[in-house]
């Protein structure tokens, strides 16, 4: 493996997740492994229905047997077995730079993205990735090629988080671009305008996408165990504050928990898989927790 | 500011440092604000929200905590620098330059002894302590020492207090060289002298320390004392009364040793009156008095079985001085706490006989014999030697040697005889008039009465008057006043007065007012007739006493001379009028011996023999000519003054006559009996008497903290300690409440994943 891949896909993580299988919900039907049923019609072995010919249709699909009997052109349609088309949205804003441990939130997000990509590519699903801050920084189109992983990893590696996040704008863009329904995985600290976030997520759900949110948070952001007079220099132009953090801890935790609860409540309402991940957690544990949770959701959201 | 600090803090230098310490919590807070850690933080939104919500509460809590810490530091600073709210409690040596005037009571009662010490020794100790206390801040304090016995002459005047001074003072105040007097002294003069001493001073803090035993009797003139103290305090002087006696001690005082020494004669009984006062609080029993004559014990002992507290008993005792000459009598009791008042002295100059001149104006010459018989029926038993002479004797012979002169029925006195007689009486001689038939009223009125200026007390009517029996008035003819002369008629003997019948008397003129109260002159009626006419009169002429009987000495006009009371009255009369200036004097200690000598009789060498424990001390004086106006034609006299009469006892003044014959004069000096009244004035009473003057402090015996001020501010110290404790507890409680504590018992937040568990689950194939 390259150095980049070692950075975001540590061998021990690969070893652990190689045993896992990603299971999409029944909404997404893949054709490659047969495990995923696709909502789309295309070339396939399994007949689905006839449809009257319209100009512009591929004449190769005209069912001549029907024409001979009815003297009308009908097109033969087959159920298409699709790949799980997954798009990873990785937040590259400045706030993702924060990290009290060895890993910053950004690095942790990258690892999540890499691990999921690897997992999905292994089972022949196609994976695409969009990195963003206030605008889309890079776009890797979905592909199921095995060497696609390296381009994803390379794309992650060159990103330097520096700017603010505008998630609503991004999600709107993604919703417009992703005409085919699939799984959209948002990996972010969600330090954005909350209304915009909720609107964006709702839009994705409205367009029929299956949405997962990995809310990456640092331990200090969740526990706030600072002590002693500290000058907090806000990222994303949030200003500075000199204070005794212990005195503000209770209020801070209340605010954070309210925020997390708010997001979770909203995601639950929108049938979005939401999961808070601490950067101190092991990656595999997080993924396993997620997958277990995911498999438990059997309800189809087919539109 | 410095003065204020000095007057409110025991250690004012700590206050400035302490003020910086008070700033320390603020400084620490500011330093902590400057020494912060920098953290780049993402979730600022929530932090700012928390800060926004808690800002006011945090500010208040932090300020409260800061205030508590400042208060703790302030309380510690106040404790260390010894805050004193009441500056009067401050040690007297704190603060600016001060002048301490010590007024030391050295009256007799300061010799009150208990244990190994006495009141005066305690007083000296206090003075030494005071100086030692002042020497801790060398040369900032001045000290003056006044003795109550000589307040106008300071022992020490405005001396700088330092170590050398303390050494000098302790040497100087040695009990041998700096003794306590035997005198009665007035606190007021001492206070006034101190006021005078301090009056001219400006710019210093003035203290007056009155070191005394503060007896109850000292405060009898409380108005004068409180006025003097008020004057001092209003002049800004801090008056400090320091008591040197812990409690009242039992004490007996010999208050009296007296007798009719003017009529004492050799080998004739001399009646002495002795008195003892018990000024203690317990009954004194079996008090024995010993009498000494020239230091030899007289075999007579007076015993008082019981003397009640605060009461005085007297007793009369007859002694017989067998030899003529000078006798030094002493009466003493056993030693008690105040030994000096346990003895009393009396000097007696005992002649062989007491000469009395009787001038008999009756040509028949038998009147004098009545008086002479009354005075000396047996010369050995009374000691009188009456001489009966006619009126010419007054002109021819000097009268000075006679103790008294009787003029009986004298018709008139020649001018030169009268002059001699007037001089004699004016000098102190006694005179007794008896009227009679021979008397010429016009001479008496014009020459002897002289409108109240002469030897005769009243103007006489033209002729004697008979006193007829009055059946309506059965009482006695004579009515006597309460007078020593008529002591014989007191009590049961009053009946004998009724036996005396007055047939004839010389009345006064109608114009003369018989009422002593209305007349208001020198004459006092001591016996009168039932008609209210005066019968016996007394008046003073110069230093002499004149007694006038307006009836005869013989039984011509009355029957008195045939009654036994006549003898008694005559003997009392001679005692009463006998000249006392020839007898040795009795004085109070401290009175100077002032001599005025005629250089014609005496040389200028005078020796004073003063009493002492190791025998008499001889002091030689040189009498100097008296300063007198040049225009004065009075003859030159030599004068000498001897002032060292502080010790009680009998002093002998030895004069050298021009004829080289030494003449001794005795003077008995006694202590004032009231000094033996050792009852202490209670502190609340003193305060009350001083009118609640709160600028006066009172120190009880044994309280010496005021010298160091050690106990000053103890109550505020207690209060500060409790406050400090409370502040510390409050600070800890608040700090604990405001500080961060990791709750180890609580489970970690639910969002935190537990390692391993999810992994186990995921091993199960889905």
Image (tube, coloured by chain):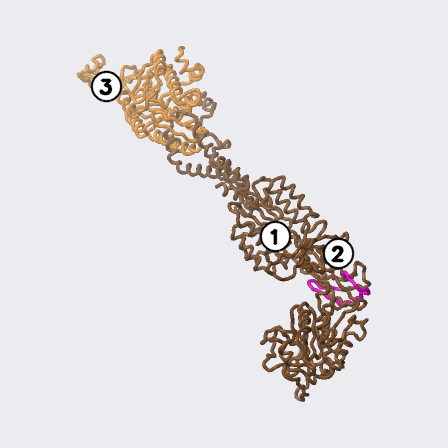
Marks 1, 3: nearer the viewer:
1
Q: For mark 2, what is the residue? A: B335
- Residue A191 x %, y %: 35, 27
Residue A301 in sight from this viewpoint: yes
Residue B304 is inside the magenta segment: no
Dot 2: few (<14), some (14–19), or many (≥20) neighbours within 10 Å? Answer: few
What label sits on residue A50 in the rendered view?
A: 3
Q: Magenta stretch containing residue B314, yes or no?
A: yes
Quarter-of-image position of residue B139 = top right
Residue B319 x, y percent position in the rendering: 79, 66
SS of the residue under disc 2:
loop
Mark 1 to mark 3 CA distance (whole Å): 145 Å
Q: Give the class, few, some or many, for how many residues have Cα within 10 Å of label 1's Cα (few <14, many ≥20).
A: many
Q: Label for residue B465?
A: none
Q: Is residue A219 visible?
A: no
Q: Name the residue at 44% across, 38% down.
A: B63
Label 1: chain letter: B
Say left or right for A29 vs B85.
left
Dominant secondary structure of the magenta stretch? strand
Q: Colour of chain B?
A: brown
Q: How many marks?
A: 3
- Asked which secondary structure carries label 3, the reply is strand
Label 3 to label 2: alpha-carbon separation: 153 Å
Q: Residues within 10 Å of mark 3 (few under 14, many from 20)?
A: some
Where in the figure is residue B69, as x and y percent of width and height? 49, 37
């Amino acid at each position: 493996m390259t150095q980049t891949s070692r950075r975001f896909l540590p061998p021990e993580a690969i070893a652990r997740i190689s045993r896992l299988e990603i299971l999409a919900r029944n909404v997404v039907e893949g054709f490659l492994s047969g495990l995923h049923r696709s909502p789309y019609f295309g070339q396939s072995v399994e007949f689905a229905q006839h449809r009257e010919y319209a100009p512009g249709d591929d004449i190769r699909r005209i069912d001549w047997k029907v024409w001979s009997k009815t003297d009308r052109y009908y097109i033969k349609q087959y159920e298409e077995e699709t790949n799980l088309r997954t798009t990873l949205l990785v937040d590259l804003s400045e706030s993702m730079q924060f990290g009290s441990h060895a890993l910053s939130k950004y690095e942790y997000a990258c690892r999540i993205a890499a691990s999921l990509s690897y997992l999905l590519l292994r089972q022949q699903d196609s994976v695409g990735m969009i990195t963003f801050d206030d605008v889309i920084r890079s776009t890797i189109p979905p592909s199921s090629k095995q060497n696609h992983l390296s381009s994803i990893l390379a794309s992650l590696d060159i990103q330097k988080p520096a700017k603010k996040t505008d998630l609503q704008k991004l999600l709107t863009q993604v919703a417009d671009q992703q005409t085919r329904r699939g799984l959209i995985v948002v990996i972010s600290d969600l330090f954005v305008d909350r209304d915009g976030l909720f609107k964006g997520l709702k839009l994705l759900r409205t367009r029929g996408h299956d949405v997962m949110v990995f809310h990456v948070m640092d331990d200090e952001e969740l526990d706030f165990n600072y002590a002693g007079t500290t000058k907090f220099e806000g990222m994303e132009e949030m200003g500075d504050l000199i204070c005794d953090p212990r005195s503000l801890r209770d209020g801070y935790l209340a605010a954070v928990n309210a925020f997390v609860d708010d997001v979770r409540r909203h995601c639950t309402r929108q049938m979005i898989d939401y999961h808070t991940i601490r950067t101190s957690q092991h990656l595999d544990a997080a993924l396993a927790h997620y997958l277990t949770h995911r498999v438990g959701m059997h309800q189809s959201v087919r539109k | 500011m410095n003065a204020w600090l000095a007057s409110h803090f025991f250690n004012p230098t700590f206050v400035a440092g302490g003020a910086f310490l008070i700033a320390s919590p603020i400084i620490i807070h500011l330093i902590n604000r400057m020494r912060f850690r920098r953290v780049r933080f993402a979730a600022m939104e929530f932090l700012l929200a928390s800060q926004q919500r808690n800002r006011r509460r945090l500010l208040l809590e932090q300020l409260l905590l800061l205030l508590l810490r400042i208060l703790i530091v302030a309380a510690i600073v106040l404790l260390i620098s010894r805050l004193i709210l009441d500056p009067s409690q401050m040690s007297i040596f704190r603060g600016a330059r001060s002048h301490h005037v010590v007024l030391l009571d050295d009256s007799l009662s300061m010799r009150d002894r208990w244990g190994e010490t006495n009141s005066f020794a305690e007083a000296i100790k206090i003075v030494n302590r005071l100086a030692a206390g002042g020497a801790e801040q060398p040369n900032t304090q001045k000290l003056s020492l006044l003795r109550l016995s000589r307040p106008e002459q300071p022992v020490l005047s405005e001396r700088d207090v330092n170590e050398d001074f303390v050494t000098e003072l302790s040497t100087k105040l040695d009990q041998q060289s700096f003794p306590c007097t035997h005198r009665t002294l007035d606190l007021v003069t001492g206070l006034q002298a101190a006021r005078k001493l301090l009056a001219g001073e400006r710019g210093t803090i003035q203290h007056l320390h009155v070191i005394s035993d503060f007896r109850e009797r000292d405060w009898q003139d409380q108005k004068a004392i409180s006025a003097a103290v008020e004057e001092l305090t209003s002049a800004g002087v801090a008056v400090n009364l320091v008591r040197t006696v812990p409690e009242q001690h039992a004490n007996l005082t010999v208050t009296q040793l007296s007798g009719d020494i003017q009529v004492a004669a050799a080998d004739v009984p001399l009646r002495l009156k002795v008195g003892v006062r018990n000024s203690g609080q317990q009954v004194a029993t079996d008090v024995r008095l010993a009498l000494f004559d020239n230091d030899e014990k007289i075999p007579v002992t007076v015993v008082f079985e019981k003397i009640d507290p605060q009461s005085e008993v007297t007793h009369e005792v007859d002694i017989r001085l067998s030899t003529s000459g000078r006798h030094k009598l002493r009466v003493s009791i056993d030693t008690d706490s105040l030994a000096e008042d346990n003895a009393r002295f009396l000097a007696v100059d005992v002649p062989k006989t007491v000469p009395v001149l009787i001038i008999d104006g009756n040509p028949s010459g038998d009147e004098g014999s009545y008086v002479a018989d009354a005075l000396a029926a047996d010369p050995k038993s009374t000691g009188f030697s009456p001489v009966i002479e006619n009126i010419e004797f007054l002109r021819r012979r000097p009268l000075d040697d006679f103790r008294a002169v009787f003029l009986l029925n004298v018709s008139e006195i020649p001018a030169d005889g009268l002059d001699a007689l007037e001089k004699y009486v004016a000098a102190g001689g006694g005179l007794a008039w008896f009227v009679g038939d021979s008397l010429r009223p016009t001479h008496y009125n014009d020459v002897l009465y002289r409108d109240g200026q002469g030897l005769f007390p009243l103007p006489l009517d033209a002729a004697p008057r008979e006193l007829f029996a009055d059946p309506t008035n059965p009482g006695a003819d004579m009515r006597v006043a309460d007078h020593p002369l008529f002591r014989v008629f007191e009590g049961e003997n009053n009946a004998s007065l009724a036996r005396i019948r007055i047939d004839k008397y010389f009345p006064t003129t109608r114009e003369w007012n018989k009422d002593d109260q209305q007349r208001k002159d020198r004459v006092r009626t001591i016996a009168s007739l039932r008609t209210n006419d005066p019968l016996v009169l007394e008046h003073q002429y110069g230093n002499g006493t004149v007694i006038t009987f307006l009836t005869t000495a013989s039984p011509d006009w009355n029957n008195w001379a045939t009654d036994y009371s006549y003898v008694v009255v005559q003997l009392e009369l001679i005692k009463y009028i006998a000249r006392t200036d020839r007898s040795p004097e009795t004085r109070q200690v401290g009175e100077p011996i002032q001599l005025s000598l005629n250089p014609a009789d005496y040389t200028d060498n005078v020796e004073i023999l003063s009493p002492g424990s190791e025998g008499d001390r001889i002091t030689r004086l040189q009498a100097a000519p008296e300063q007198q106006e040049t225009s004065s034609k009075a003859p030159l006299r030599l004068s000498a003054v001897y002032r060292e009469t502080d010790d009680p006892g009998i002093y002998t003044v030895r004069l050298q006559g021009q004829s080289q014959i030494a003449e001794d004069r005795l003077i008995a000096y006694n202590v004032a009996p009231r000094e033996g009244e050792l009852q202490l004035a209670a502190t609340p009473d003193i305060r009350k008497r001083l009118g609640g003057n709160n600028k006066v402090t009172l120190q009880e015996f044994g309280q010496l903290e005021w010298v160091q001020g050690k106990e000053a501010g103890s109550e505020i110290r207690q209060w500060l300690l409790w406050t400090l404790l409370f502040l510390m507890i409050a600070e800890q409680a608040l700090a604990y409440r405001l500080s961060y504590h990791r709750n180890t018992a609580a489970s970690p937040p639910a969002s935190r994943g537990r390692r391993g568990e999810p992994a186990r689950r995921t091993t199960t194939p889905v």
